[in-house]
Image (tube, grey):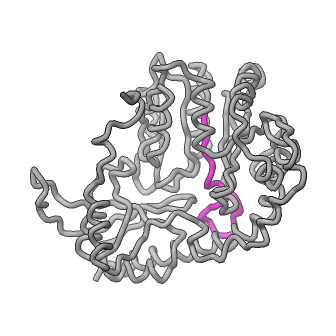
Amino acid sequence: MASSRVPAPDEFARNRVASLLEAKRREGRDVLDLTVSNPTLAGLGWPPASLLGALADGRAARHDPDPRGPAAAREAVASHLAARGAVDPERVFLTASTSEAYAHLFRLLCEPGDEVLIPRPSYPLIEPIARLEGVRAVPYRLSYGGRWRLDVDSLEASAGPRTRAVVVVQPNNPTGSCFDPSEIATVDGLCLARGLAILSDEVFGDFPWRAGAQALPSLMGATRAPTFTLGGISKACGLPQMKVSWIVASGAKESLAPLLPGLEWILDLFLSVGAPAALALPEFLRSGGEFRTPMRERLSRNLRVLRDAASRSAGRLDVLDGDGGWTAILRVGFEQEPSAAPGGVHEDLAEWALARHDVYLHPAHFYDLARDDLAVVSLIGDPEVLERALSRILG
């Protein structure tokens, strides 16, 4: 029998939107996909084949393990992050992915049955990783009233005697929101008072929506509680297939220092970052600007497409405000109809758009957004496809 930490067979069943999408594609329908998240398939001509030459470093022929990753790679990460705060390369730890980084940190901080607080809405990745590590993910609320804000009462109410960490996703996926300085201070104060760590997922931190900005603020150096900031080249350099990410440790020395030997011990058990990718990391980060610039231009153009459509929609379309990242939340006024599903459940926006207009959006419930008139759209796809899809939806 499989462990209870692994989903039961019935949990792998396709949801209604996924089943409908499969049927549409079987029929050969012209479905416009607004969910693309793979930067290598975004039509930016990235990465160039020449970049792969960086993987041919002869030093990779020798096994010379460092659980933190090669010094040159960690120095390159520190240099890349310098615009967002000073980083000591000795406090940089390489992992194969952000998912792996979460798992390592849950192992470091939690006993089985302990809890971590996670934002809601958010991308549905953290909870299953926590579950696999025997850790319970407890949500705290982000609320929207013209902008997304931390619900402080929700955060404080969610923290219990077995809470060990607070996860911050900055900018959040899918809301695109960041905490302001007062909200960061609130999280830091709670963690200091209760002896908790902060896990700050900043994988989209290089992609602000504000014109001219190169990066979003970071929690690195902004907190006294032990803080572990997550990033990687999947987003920063558009190279998800190269499997290199990082953890940056910061916070007050007296509370952080006792945790670092344990983190290094965990990393030494796995040694999961391959030598070719680790040795190529300085070149990947150096060349990443050739990806980030056109990607920022793509984000800006797609946001203009959405906002222009909203301004012409007579109130039928809203784009919820945010600070950065690769996704946006849409509100669309549409006429719901009873479903043929058991119980007569009404359609949500994503199901309606796919069923009526052959437009594929990420459903709101995928991110724990509890409103039927909301859906999530990727900002990295072809702007012309986005324009065509909005024309279909708005008529």
For the residue pair 21 and 373, the one nearer the viewer reads as 21
Image quadrant in which you'd find residue 219: top right
In the rendered image, residue 249, in percent from the top left (x then y), is placed at 73, 34
At horizontal 33% and vertical 51% (from top left) the residue drawn is: 365
Quadrant into which the C terminus falls: bottom left
Majority secondary structure in the magenta region: loop
Q: How many marks?
A: 0
Picture coordinates of residue 260 (x, y %)?
Answer: 74, 25
Q: Is residue 210 magenta?
A: yes
Q: Residue at x 40, y 53 (%)?
A: 145
- Please provide percent x and percent y for residue 56: 84, 60
Q: Quadrant of residue 353?
A: bottom left
Seen from this angle, which residue lies furthest top? 161
**Vertical arrangement, residue 251 with respect to residue 294, above or below:** above
Residue 61 is left or right of residue 249, and the answer is right
Q: Is 183 drawn above or below residue 340 in the view shown?
A: above
| Residues rendered magenta in the picture | 198-215
Q: For residue 271: magenta? A: no
386 sits to left or right of 45: left
Q: Position of residue 46 (x, y in %)?
A: 67, 72
